[in-house]
Amino acid sequence: MSAWICFGLLSSELMRDVKATIASAENQLQVQQVESKPEDQAEHVESNMAFRQLPFMGVIRVNDLATEHGFRMGHPDWINLGQGQPEVGELDGAPPRPSRIDIDIADHAYGAVEGIDELRQAVAAHYNRLYRNGKASKYTAENVAISSGGRLALSRCGAALDDVRLGYFTPDYTAYEDLMTTFHRLNPVAIELDVKDGFRIDPNELQKKVVQDKLGALLISNPCNPTGMIIQGEELSAWVEMARQQDCTLLMDEFYSHFNYSNGADGPVSSAEYVEDVNIDPVVIFDGLTKCFRYPGWRVGWVLAPKTVIRAFTAAGSFLDGGPSRPIQKAAVDILEPNRADQETNALRAAFSQKQQITITRLKEMGIDVPGNPQGTFYVFASVKNLPKPLITGEGFMNEAFKHQVLTVPGEYFDVNPNRLRKGVSPLESFVRFSFGPPKEQLEQGLDRLAKMIAAM
Ligand SMILES: Cc1ncc(COP(=O)(O)O)c(C=O)c1O
């Protein structure tokens, strides 16, 4: 509008000059448009407008790349040893998979942001039964918030945390990097885990770091995705004690808590076992139905924490998402019924410990190095550095495996590095994460294909 007012005030001579300048600019523009290549135009059309360039999270990036080779979810010719989900069908010894859910009229209304009471109580009871027998302080519904899956629980956490120096580990779950770059109050501090130490850190060493680096919180997946290492028993007890003494909040992502195949371990692992007072100890636990109950599509996650922390998570959920689905939460209550839950998780451990052994044995036979002593999850994190070229890097291995219709994930995708501040080659460049999430027959077929690929090099 103001531009048009200006034009009205110009003398006619000046107007002619202005018009000539505009005409010449338009001509130039037309020439440029004629000369510009079709790709440039395509780039222009596909520009992100006001949005930032946001890459897919590492594991999802593999699926995206594989589609260029013809991969589709559920394609019968492809074997997905990159997948981040356990098999979801019937399993020997496990209860039958539900095939329908009920919806009441009341379920059409909004539910509570923190989740329905029945499920919050069922989650609290599940932890008290498994980890807090004989302890005076027990979890109640007020210590639980339900969210639509684990990543949303982590996002609520990112939104609810105050300015904090947040220690994180590398390698670890890829989404942590995105979390720490999205929520700007978080001040990430890296703790590198070395393959020489079996991707572990001594609790005393950790305590020193917490003190030296003034860490207000630590975020870790335990059991660890991708390495399969587990902190448990006295070691885990020492972590919780350190958190209490140093007032350093433990953000324990326990999404693989039931995938524990370590010698002598006859059950799941959780820091809940070492908490003294559930409303005072600075321990926040994330888990859900995604992995341990094999329902990734249900999107049911939960957080256990002191009551005050649950209120902060709920406040974050009140603007982030508005709370989880009511009908799905009701169905989730049945899944946590004690007998059913034990049947499912025992069957899971039996089936997956066998698949872990198969995977480790076969990979070693192929000349792939499996460091440390992985005890959990449904991944094997292994080094391909001794294989023939071009298989010696995670990326090289992934690209060759695509040709054999197998998906794997390069280890460097788990090199958590917020804002890519650490430069240079990733120490995880020669690693690959192999998933034994698929059913046994598929897993064996995928391993056969990889063995053939390597032998043909
Ligand atoms: C360590 C870890 N935490 C949390 C999640 C999130 O699970 P969800 O699919 O429920 O968001 C995953 C999924 O891969 C994971 O590996």
Image: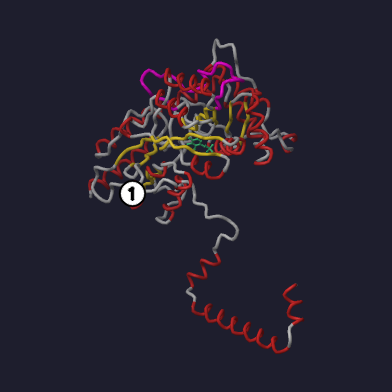
Question: Which quarter of the figure has residue 445?
Answer: top left
Membership of 147 in magenta stretch: no
Q: Give whichever of 450, 381 is nearer the camera.
A: 381
> Which residues are the magenta region?
259-284
Element on which disc 1 rests: helix
* Image x and y of residue 109, in percent: 74, 37
Say what amino acid the circle numbered 1 marks.
Ala
Q: Give whichever of 201, 152 is nearer the camera.
A: 201
* Image x and y of residue 388, in percent: 23, 47
Q: Quadrant of the N terminus?
A: bottom right
Relative side of 135 to 106, left or right = left
Q: Is mark 1 within 8 Å of ligand 1?
A: no
Relative side of 339 to 20, left or right = left
Question: Which quarter of the figure has residue 439?
Answer: top left
> How many neighbours does mark 1 have within 10 angstroms: few (below 14), some (14-19), or many (20 or more)?
many
| Principal secondary structure, stretch drawn in magenta | loop
The residue that appears at 56% across and 24% down in the rendered structure is 282
Relative side of 28 to 264, left or right = right
How many numbered marks, from 0 up?
A: 1
The residue that appears at 49% across and 21% down in the rendered structure is 240
* Image x and y of residue 359, in percent: 33, 34
Question: Which quarter of the figure has residue 362?
Answer: top left
Color scheme of the displayed model: secondary structure
Membership of 267 in magenta stretch: yes
416 vs 231: above or below: below
Tag 1 residue: 401
Q: Give whichever of 30, 339 is nearer the camera.
A: 30
* Image x and y of residue 122, in percent: 61, 23
